[in-house]
Each structure stands twice: as structure tokens, then as C-alpha cells.
Image (cartoon, grey):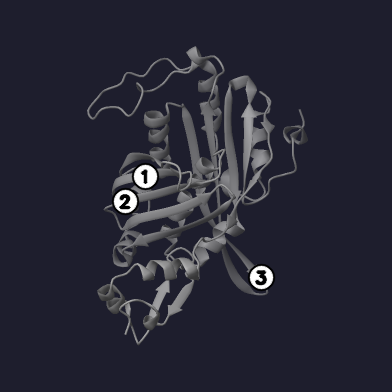
Amino acid sequence: MSEAGVRAVAPAGDDAALPFEVAALDVRGRAIQMGPVLNTILAGHAYPDSVSKLLGEALVLAVLLGSSLKFDGKFILQTDTDGPVDMLVVDYRTDGGMRGYARFDAEKVAAAEAEGRTEPGALLGKGVLAMTIDQGPEMSRYQGIVPLDGGTLEDAGHTYFRQSEQIPTRIRLAVAEFQSRETGELVRTWRAGGLIVQFLPKAPERMQADLPGGDAPEGMEVEAGEEDDAWVEAQSLVGTIEDHELTDPAVPAERLLFRLFHERGVRVFSPIQVVDRCSCSREKVEGLLESFSAEEIAESIEDGGIAVTCEFCGRKYAFDPDQFSGGS
């Protein structure tokens, strides 16, 4: 099979999740390389490099998980931890729009970078990762929560699918900064990539869940069963992926999938485009301020006005306090 034979559609390119299937192994998944969208989101905040890399991983993970939704809504990924980066928030909407931001202690991050402690576990610390599926105001939200205990976002993703979804899953994430010279100036850009592979056999008896239905009770020990040969093979192939293959523009998603699965045959489907799109607006911010009490409005006034900055995109909104109840 030629490399071109892996493509059922036009090449996905950057910033597009590419669904795929390897029928011979009963696995499905999605792959993505992020470029301009990732760079725009990160450049808008001027985060320290270690924070940018961590948020980049969260953005890729949100796309890999959220792009599987079959309805209009959004997927929200949020961490709440005690480390130097105590919160990551990513919103992915099923129309492809996404946004994200990180909250961190600048002094603690600087100290961690100086000491070389920039791995995800050191920056995040201990806490939880919540993944929420929001189908709109008329539908109930679904939320899965997994612990973060000094591990990576990949580890947390594996825990989520093992405990909550009962689907054997492997996830790979990578983020890298590239440097180039344009008209004599050094230009720094961010790229990221990721892959999720899941074992979804048609015969239910081949699906070997890691845990009984629902999350495992605290302290419960679960014996691992013998894994299906097809899933063992798929995991072994995914284990050969190098970080640079996920971020290198010379190794697009189609080429990586061909390298992994060409002997078994891999089919790709129409890519799902991702765009940098914040959902903030002047009307939404104004509506929020209108819900404030007179005391809260008074506390929000600085230099005779009220200024609100969106934490996601950095857009600034200015208001006259007199237009709100209690303004002066």
C-alpha cells in the first residue's frame, strides 16, 4: 500500500483533528497537529515557556476528546491543583472553536524553571482534572473527575477512560517550540500534536474492561485481565511514537498514521477543523455586571470606570459605572 492509499480525504494539515480506523485491529482514534491556532492562543498571553507547553498539552487533549462528540455542545477540560500552575481551562466547542488559559504563580513557576522542575507533574502538583460535556441549557451536564497526583495529562486521560468509560485507550501528547529567522529576526512559534487510539471491537466479549462498571471504589485493587492480541499490537505501535513526530510539520498526521498502521491498513475520515474563537462578548460581560450588587459594582470601579479583561483572549471591555444599578 502506498502512503497515498491511507488518505480517503484531502490531507488534514494543521489545526484539524483527523479521525481514523484500523479495522484489522478493531481500533479507532483521532490524530492532530496544531500550529497557527495553538500559536495564536499561547502568544496572546505571554506565558513562561513551561506554562505555555503545559497549556498546549491541555489544548491538544481537549481537541482529541471533544472532537468525538456527535452533538452540538462543548467539552470543558479544567484542572484544580496545588502546584505552581494551579488551574488550566480549555473550552472546545463542536463547531471547532476553542479557547484556553492558565492560572499560575509567577514566582513559583520561575523557581521551578530555575531548578529544572518543568515536567507536568511538578508544575501541576496534586489535585483533580475535571472533564465536562455540556450539551446546552436544556440538557444535563456529564462530568468525569480523575485525580492528578504528580503525573501527566496523558496519565490522567488514561485514568479517565479506564475508570469512567471502560474503553481501553492510549493517548500521546507533545508540544515543542520552533525557532526560525525571518528578515533577520528570530521568530519563535509553538507546535503541538497528539494521538488517541481506542480498542472498540464489535464482539463485546473481546472488550476487557479494566474496572467494574463505574469508578472504582477508593482503595479497591483490580486485577488486570489478559489483553486482546489486537490491542496489544496497537499499543506496541503507538509506543514507538517519538515526540518530534507529533510536532514536526514534515510528519503530518496522515504520514504518522501510515508509518504506524500501513501493514494493517488504516482508513482516515474527513478532518474536523479547529479555530481560535473566544466566546466572550460585550453583551455577555454587560449581562454579568448587571447581576452584581451595588456593593460589588462599587468595588469594581477603578479610575472612574469599570474595566473587564477576558482571561481567555485578553480582550478588554470598558463600561461606565452609572449604567449599572448602584453605579456612581
Q: Which residue is mark 3?
A: 182
Name of the residue lying farthest toward the left: 219
Mark 1 vs mark 3: in front: 1
Mark 3 vs mark 2: in front: 2
Q: Position of residue 128 (x, y in %)?
A: 31, 45
For marks 1 and 3 on the same chain, the one whose residue lies earlier in the sequence: 1
**Seen in the image, is 119 located left or right of residue 173?**
left
For marks 3 and 2 on the same chain, the one whose residue lies earlier in the sequence: 2
Distance from disc 1 to disc 3, alpha carbons, whole Å, reads: 41 Å
Q: Position of residue 41 (x, y in %)?
A: 52, 61
Report the front residue among 240 and 158: 158
Whether residues under marks 2 and 1 lie with C-beta atoms below 8 angstroms apart, the answer is: yes
Image quarter (top left, top right, bottom left or bottom right) of the C terminus: bottom left
Q: Which residue is mark 1?
A: 130
Q: Position of residue 146 (x, y in %)?
A: 34, 39
Q: Residue at the spot x=63%, y=26% of the render? A: 22
Q: Residue at the spot x=41%, y=82% of the render? A: 320
* Residue 89 appears anywhere in the view: yes
- Badge 2 marks a residue whose secondary structure is strand
Q: Position of residue 142 (x, y in %)?
A: 40, 39
Q: Which residue is mark 2?
A: 80
User: Neighbour class for label 2 at 10 Å: few (<14), some, many (≥20)?
Assistant: many
- Give the residue type at disc 3: Glu
* Residue 190 appears anywhere in the view: no
- Give the residue type at disc 2: Asp
- Badge 1 marks a residue whose secondary structure is strand
Which mark is on residue 87?
none
Q: Residue at the spot x=62%, y=37% of the render? A: 19
In the rendered view, would you say 92 is above or below 240?
Answer: below
In the rendered view, would you say 283 is above or below 53?
Answer: below
